[in-house]
Amino acid sequence: MARNEEKAQSMLNRFITMKQEEKRKPRERRPYLASECRDLADAERWRSEILREIGAKVAEIQNEGLGEHRLRDLNDEINKLLRERGHWERRIVELGGRDYSRSSNAPLMTDLDGNIVAVPNPSGRGPGYRYFGAARKLPGVRELFDKPPETRKRRTRYEIHKRINAGYYGYYDDEDGVLERLEAPAEKRMREEVVSEWHRVERVRREAMKGVVSGEVAAAGGRSGEAAREVLFEGVEEEVEEERKREEEKRERERGEEAGGEFVAHVPLPDEKEIERMVLERKKKELLSKYASDTLQVEQEEAKEMLNVRR
């Protein structure tokens, strides 16, 4: 039995094929301009043909192994067909047909990161060049789809403070009176505690002062000693020390009066001659600083040091 290729090449089969082609109408080509079409049905048919071509080329462009040049050519052809489809849709509207530019369902797509997002300009209408399939990953194209990193704008001090009012600082909390009613019992209790504590400290302080005046604080025991120590811990040790010093000075004055009223100096005091010499030296320095230059004063000091002159 002969193979299929041999059957196709036989004289009879070639004759039958030629007769069938003669009976067929010549293949009609799509008009170059949509405005040349006068029939609505033909316009719908040419639009459907363009959609089939677009679908075939979009399926082909998904293959990343086609190479950069082939992918760019396919992408150009798809964009050209999209523009041609727009021409035919406008022609269909002119002939009284359906307006395909209004689509209610927004299609979805998957971006390069695998996220499902809405297709921007899904109908392909309007200005602009679009990329499909593997053409979106070509060098120089991928950067167009990468979103720039979000940079948070630093707020200025004016922007931070322009929304701050008195309520931010709590000045409006007492306007309704609710907070005042809630805090009144606690405020009264705290005031009573502070007043009672103040009376206790004053009572203890008076007892400690009595012990200081009598000189029995250090050796006092029992209630008086405890009162003095408690006062010291309350932060009034400076007052107690001052009171003790005043009592000691008073006793020293009384002993001095009993000894004859003689004043005893515990610090060496200068006599009249020493005071006069110091005043004279001070006046000399003032005159020298007023009428003599700094260089002359330095030379004078060096001469005194060389001659061992102290005055």
Image (spheres, helix red, strand yellow):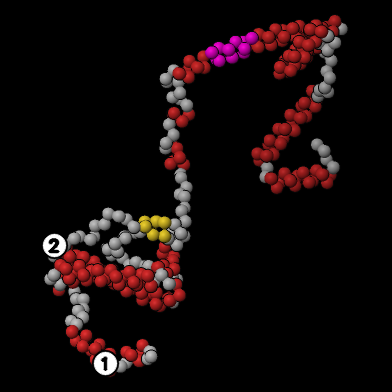
Q: Residue 15 appears at what percent x and percent y? A: 24, 91
User: Which residue corresponds to the image point at 28% horizontal and 68% vertical from the top-left?
Assistant: 51
Q: Mark 2 falls on what kind of element?
A: loop
Q: Residue furthest bottom?
A: 11
Query: What range of the chain is rendered magenta?
Result: 185-196
Q: Amino acid at mark 1?
A: Leu
Magenta stretch holds residue 191: yes
Q: Residue furthest front?
A: 1
Identify whether 118 is placed above or below 289.
Answer: below
User: CA gap, disc 2 to disc 1?
Assistant: 50 Å
Q: Residue 208 appears at what percent x and percent y? A: 75, 9
Front-lying residue, 107 or 143: 107
Front-lying residue, 263 or 166: 166
**Image quadrant where residue 267 sits:** top right
Q: Residue 98 appears at what percent x and percent y? A: 18, 60
Task: Answer left or right for 151 relative to 211.
Answer: left
Q: Mark 1 falls on what kind of element?
A: helix
User: Which residue corresponds to the image point at 78% horizontal and 29% vertical from the top-left?
Assistant: 277
Q: Which mark is residue 12?
A: 1
Task: Answer left or right for 302 relative to 112.
Answer: right
Question: Mark 1, residues whose alpha carbon is within 10 Å: few (<14), some, or many (≥20)?
Answer: few
Give the labeled residue for mark 2.
Answer: 96
The dominant secondary structure in magenta is: helix
User: Which residue corresponds to the image point at 31% horizontal and 70% vertical from the top-left?
Assistant: 54
Magenta stretch holds residue 172: no
Q: Residue 296 appears at what percent x and percent y? A: 71, 46
Can see residue 260? no
Q: Amino acid at mark 2?
A: Gly
N-term mark: 2 or 1: 1
Q: On the rendered image, what quadrant is the C terminus found in?
A: top right
